[in-house]
Image (cartoon, rainbow, N blue to C red):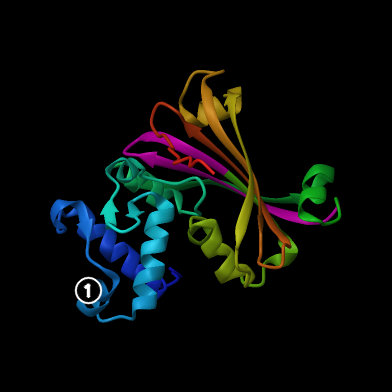
Amino acid sequence: MFKRSPSLTEQIKLHIKQQILDGEFEGDRIPSEPELANELGVSRTTVRDALSRLESEGAIVRKQGMGTFINRPGLQIRSRLEEIWSYESVLEAHGYTPSVYVLGTEEKPAGAKIAKELDIDENDTVLVIEKLFVEDTTPVILTCNTIPASSIVKPYDEAACSLPIYEFLEEHCQQQLSYYLSDIAPVSASPEIAKKLETPEKTALLALKEVGYDINNHPLLKAASYFRDDLIRFRLIRRRT
């Protein structure tokens, strides 16, 4: 399986966050940047960038003239909507032991709506990958990803389709997903979706309808995800500007 190695800054961020979770800092006070840099054997710049990421996530707070402290309410956020995670990681953050099943793959004409969103011709072929993420035997998340077939440069199989979509794009399309433009809305489960998620029809679900782009703002894929609200929740920190 193809995986990207985290940057040094990300590794340091994760290490400090684990120290926080393990209760290694007395009085909820984070050591100074020089102290952390010396302890971890990295530059102050790397530590500063890692702390900035933790601050943006709400895990720590910087108080002028006092230092940097753990933000306990922020640690309650287990997965963040503004970051691109694999759904396996999202479920693990909620305490689940997830499995992923490829429900089906299909190559078909894009159609007018998808073609417009992906900037392709409506007669161009797209690959549609539908996956189900489950905890034990309970479905939690249903996803449907649509990719222009012309983007695929390496043959794929079911195992490849089970990869997180950003890894599939890297390994089989030689493309790098940079960001999503996402619409978030509650929806009622259609008969088809309800059957796959094993929930009653018209059950309220959280839906993400997204288009993923590369760094040059070129659309790479259309994605739709449906979450069982009774099993998974997302939280945000909203700051006053």
In-image side of 225 versus 128 (left or right): left
Q: Which of 61 and 163 is in front in this view?
A: 61
Q: Which of 169 and 65 is in front in this view?
A: 65
- Point out the stretch of residues depicted in magenta: 123-143
Q: In which quarter of the image is residue 190?
A: top right
Q: Is residue 51 above or below residue 105?
A: below
Q: Nearer the viewer, residue 139 or 175?
A: 175
Residue 59 in the image: state x and y as whole percent: 33, 51
Residue 230 covered by magenta stretch:
no
| Quarter of the figure with the C terminus | top right
Residue located 36% across and 43% down the image: 77
Q: Is residue 153 above or below residue 115?
A: below
Q: Name the residue under label 1.
A: 35
| Quarter of the figure with the N terminus | bottom left
Residue located 46% across and 30% down the image: 228
Residue 4 in the image: state x and y as whole percent: 45, 71
Residue 93 in the image: state x and y as whole percent: 33, 46
Residue 86 in the image: state x and y as whole percent: 45, 53
Q: Count neighbours of disc 1 (C-alpha within 10 A) and say few if under 14, some if 14 to 19, many if 20 or more.
A: few
Residue located 52% across and 49% down the image: 82
Q: In which quarter of the image is residue 41?
A: bottom left
From the image, give the main secondary structure of the stretch colored magenta. Answer: strand
